[in-house]
Amino acid sequence: MSASPDPPEDVIARWDGEGGAEPDGPQAAAPEREGQPAAGPPTAQEWAEMRTRVIALENLVIALLATASDEQRALAKRMARYIAPRPGATPHRLTLHAAHRMSDLVDRAERFEDAPR
């Protein structure tokens, strides 16, 4: 018998407790490579590649959500509501905008539900 999935609140709390994707999270402790210069700001070419990858990932997420159950899409929208600054942190417009982007991805995926195949 499999255990029931953790509620979103527990998942978020665990993510926060493990450092999540924050600069002070576990990845900040990664050792520097010897002989490697510190990375500078991304070049225009690197930014273009990053944008291309984000567009590809967004479309992949939309495709996966389009075949997801109603419950899974509802969960994705509920998870978007949990995106918020950490307690005591100043709200950053990009963080706040991320929740809207998540919900938008689900909405875009739902448009494909009734599309002819």
Image (spheres, rainbow, N blue to C red):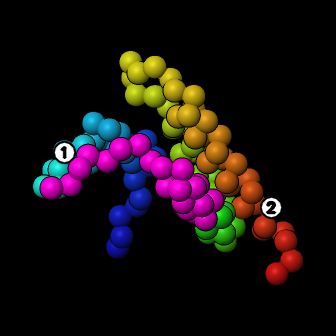
Distance, label 1 to label 2, CA atoms, is 42 Å
How many circles with numbers are drawn on the protein? 2
| x, y percent for residue 36 | 21, 55
Question: What kind of residue is marked 1?
Answer: Ala
Label 2 is placed on what type of residue? Arg
- On whether residue 45 falls in the magenta region, the answer is yes
Q: Quadrant of the N terminus?
A: bottom left
Q: Residue furthest right?
A: 116
Left or right: 30 in relation to 100: left
Closer to us: 50 or 8: 50
- Badge 2 element: helix
Q: Quadrant of residue 86?
A: top left
29 or 115, nearer to the observer: 29
The residue carrying mark 2 is: 111
- Residue 9 sits in quarter: top left
Please tell me which residue lies in front, 115 or 5.
115
Q: Position of residue 26 (x, y in %)?
A: 24, 46
Residue 42: in magenta span: yes
For disc 1, the marked residue is 29
The region drawn magenta spans: 35-57
The C terminus: image quadrant: bottom right
Residue 25 percent across, percent down from the top left: 27, 41
* Horizontal arrangement in the rendering, residue 7 relative to residue 3 (left or right): right
Tell me if I can see residue 18 in this picture.
no
Q: Residue at x 38, y 18 (%)?
A: 88
Question: Which is closer to the viewer, label 1 or label 2?
Answer: 1
Neighbours of disc 2 within 10 Å: few (<14), some (14-19), many (20+): few
Q: Is residue 81 above or below residue 86?
A: below
Which tag, 1 or 2, sits closer to the chain's start?
A: 1
| Rendered residue at 58%/40% (across/down) | 98
Q: Is residue 78 left or right of residue 46?
A: right
Q: Is residue 79 left or right of residue 69?
A: left
